[in-house]
Amino acid sequence: MSATANVCVVIPAAGLGERLGLNQPKAFVSINNWSLLSLTIKRVLEISRVGHLIVAVPADSKAEALDHIDRAMRDADRKIAFDVVEGGETRTESVKNSLLALDQLDSLVLVHDAARPFVPKSVFENVIEKLDSGSKVVIPVIPVSDTIKTVDEKSEVLNTLDRSKLRAVQTPQGFAREVLSEIYATADLQPTTDDAGLAELAGIVVTTVEGSVESFKITTPFDLEMAQSFMNRK
Ligand code: CTP
Ligand code: MG
């Protein structure tokens, strides 16, 4: 893949944020008056190779999403082509719907959650660089610092996993466009918590690159408090 291949970023932002419990889609929740969606798009706009953005949002939220996209583009003083699509019941369906809006020229596609608004530019660069060098599926990961055990239905420990082989997986997850389209085209699409999971099911090699602790995912009220502190840090 040439180093000038067009990059499209898909942002699944159609989740309801039930664990956050604020009765609004998580992507529209604000920190310091900036929605998670706007913050995320501002980060995406720092990557000059990205020329197309596709955002999946809950049904009936398209107008609100347009405001958040517009605000990010005005603040970054950079406007790129974008599409807003209706998400589905699961993240997997939201991404699948998003892929219908891909442009012929989008040869690399990065899928990045709106729930990770502080992803550093370096992580996008790591993923794009690996795709440029020929990898078809690339995911950013970080080492795991907790010891991880599996438990049974009685909450009793079954075993302890070898931590040196474990990685916590983040987004953006990057794909050669034809590979992403192929893994989402299967008729009995299984919901997976990340996109690379579908590649694994299809037997496609998934390559890892360095992620960042700053790219933490906002899921719970405590995560939102941490995000607030992170944004206000000196
Ligand atoms: N997402 C999506 N469509 C869905 C579900 C999730 O686009 N049907 C998106 C979310 O908006 C988020 C990302 O996928 O950016 C990761 O999902 P998650 O953190 O689980 O967010 P929510 O589904 O909103 O949260 P919850 O599971 O607590 O309701
Ligand atoms: Mg969810």
Image: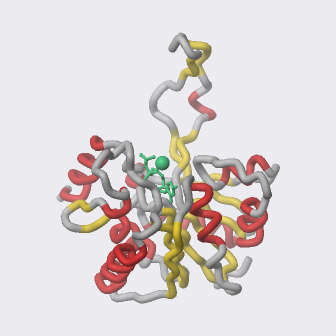
The answer to whether residue 166 of the structure is visible from this angle is: yes
Q: Is 166 displayed left or right of 119 in the figure?
A: right
Q: Is 221 displayed left or right of 33 in the figure?
A: right
| Residue drawn at (77%, 47%) of the image | 201
Front in this rendered view, residue 133 or 116: 116
Q: From the image, which quarter does the C terminus lie in?
A: bottom left
| Residue drawn at (61%, 24%) of the image | 161
Q: From the image, which quarter does the N terminus lie in?
A: bottom right
Q: Residue lying farthest right?
A: 203
> Does residue 123 sit above or below 3 in this rendering?
above
- Residue 3 x %, y %: 66, 80
Quarter-wise, where is residue 41 in the image? bottom left
| Residue drawn at (45%, 53%) of the image | 212
Front in this rendered view, residue 210 or 19: 19
> Does residue 19 sit above or below 76 in this rendering?
above
| Residue drawn at (33%, 79%) of the image | 67
Quarter-wise, where is residue 132 in the image? bottom right
- Residue 146 x %, y %: 45, 29
Q: Is 232 displayed left or right of 190 in the figure?
A: left
- Residue 78 x %, y %: 39, 88
